[in-house]
Amino acid sequence: MPYFGLVGASVVREVTVGTSAHPFRTGTMDHHVLAVARSVPAASRLLDVIPLLDSETTKVSYTIPPGSVSERGVERVLREAGVDHITPWAEARRARYGLAMAASPKGGLHRLRARRLLLMPHGAGHNRLVNKRPGDLVVASGLSPRQLTRWGLFGRRIIPSALALPHSEQWRRLHAEDPDLAARVTIVGDPCYDRIQAHQGRRERYRSLLGVGPEQRLVVLSSTWNKESLLGDQREIIRELIATLPTDDYQFALIAHPNVWATEGADQVHRWFTDEKASGMRIVPPEEGWRAALIAADLVVGDHGSVTYYASAIGRPVLLAAFDGDELDSASPLLTYRDMVPSLDPAEPLPPQVLQALKQAPPDATRLLIEHPGSSAERLRDVIYTLLETSPPDDSYFAELPDPPAFAPRPTGWRVDADIDVTVPQMDLRRYPPQSSTPDHTHRRSLVLDREDASHRWQAAEGWSNRTPTEEHPAAEWLVHILRENRRATVAVADTTLGHSLVLDREGRYQRVHSEGLDAAQIAAAAAAWRKERHPWTSWEHGLAVTIGPQKSRLRSTPPPPNLPIFRG
């Protein structure tokens, strides 16, 4: 819908609070804009939009109104974005600005003395019935006249001068509630979506930083907040996925809504997933990094949160593991979205459902909630400078996304099983996190630990590895030592500086094992699975074809060097 003009806000002459009137200022600014960052998501959306302002003529100040669940994290988000001065809320309420911008209808916006107020959503449109608590509105938060108007001595006042919305369906919902509010709407598209799309070319870069192998699949687990979210209702699905999808084929990353971090605490979020983190799962920080994770993802398992929807909007396959429709506006397109994407059935085996989702083309969900893809920067810029009553700059661009923190996982333990055909011979080897094995899995999976393991499961290990290349005789001394110390272990493997691995079994037999790109931990997994089935080593002398995740290799053993330390099991 078109923008219908500037109405409703009381006109207050802008004063130069904190701008060029300061005696020690260097720059001269024509406009002063206040960014009202009430929550972590709202702050992130404002940081999407601020780069559209002309840095030569426009000063931006930031303030944090109280009351948000994620309020404690807002300052950290702003500091990491380079904001070194945050105006106290009480001071911001007294000062005068040419324009205030907010991405939440809450927080006492009616108390500001800004000449104009621009309001926008902080997620994928306005969908949730949340004001002070979930379910306490009859229309979506951000579209409710209860939030957007105020009654006083002179009658009803409309708080926002303009509302920038991503899709005309939200204008229609607002118009049904209050035509006067709908008259202040401009449909601009979605700046968050546009920023994600602009960075799709960095997919391989983000995958590398997240530690995802070239042929591995990254499963991103996305949870909003509340008891009916993925984390609130179906946390066991996360553990079951990690327990049943081999680590050489799959990597995992968890995105939790900032309100989860704020209400539960960062320590609790990390404690929930201590074992999964040890198995290599990444936990994405609440401030930024989730967009890079979506770009890097091969599959997203999520719920009714905006992050899950954005995954579909950029073309990633999605499985819904939870969905709280009762919390959504009955007219929200997210209810239509729920019917477009497959759901994960916890009563059925999960790996086939994951494979099926990876094979299917995702539905085209973008236009449910997003119009004008790719042009939100220009449209928002025009709205902003219309409110400032001046001409916009010629060009406006969103800022680049920061890279996610580099993550170099090095798991130190695995549960191993394998399908072996001794007639070929060949082995299909699968490794799983040791911490995530359920009882029905554990009895048939060998436990293999690396020398670096610190889990105190040593006495249960059937195989050991040392991935630090060592000269052969010191490597053999370590092999003898580890088998003596761990009586249940049947085999140990050490990488050598000569480019092969040295293997010792409990019967005291040494082998040099040559492979194509496998390290000692992978060879130890193969050896433990081989010994569990009591197959003879002679097949290794002729060559054993091994498939481990996407990697195919061939193991071949040769006689050991003379004079190695003797081991008698």
Image (cartoon, rainbow, N blue to C red):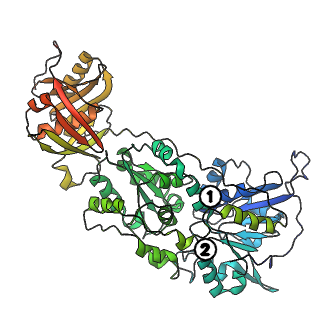
Give yes or no for contact between labels 1 and 2 (Cβ–Cβ under 8 Å). no
Quick one: 36 or 116, which is closer to the camera?
116
Q: Of the numbered discs in the image, which one, if any, rests on residue 308?
A: none
Q: Earlier in the sequence, mark 1 or mark 2?
A: 1
Tell me if 154 is positioned left or right of 535 in this view.
right
Residue 205 or 65: which is nearer the viewer?
A: 205
- Percent across and percent down for residue 180 are 72, 85
The residue beneath circle 1 is 44
Type of the residue with mark 2: His
Mark 1 lies on a secondary structure that is helix
Q: CA distance from mark 1 to mark 2?
A: 20 Å
Badge 2: how crowded within 10 Å, few (<14), some, or many (20+)?
many
Q: Residue at x 50, y 44 (%)?
A: 205
Residue position marked by numbered label 2 in the rendering: 167
Asked whether the viewer can see residue 39, the reply is no
Residue at the (80%, 78%) spot, across then down: 7
> Does residue 1 lie above or below 113 as drawn?
below
Q: Position of residue 376 (x, y in %)?
A: 66, 64
Task: Locate the C terminus by quadrant.
Answer: top left
Question: In terms of secondary structure, where does tag 2 sit?
Answer: loop
Q: Quadrant of residue 143?
A: bottom right
Can residue 216 be seen here? The reply is yes
Residue 380 position in % (x across, y down): 71, 65
Pick the quarter of the image with the N terminus: bottom right
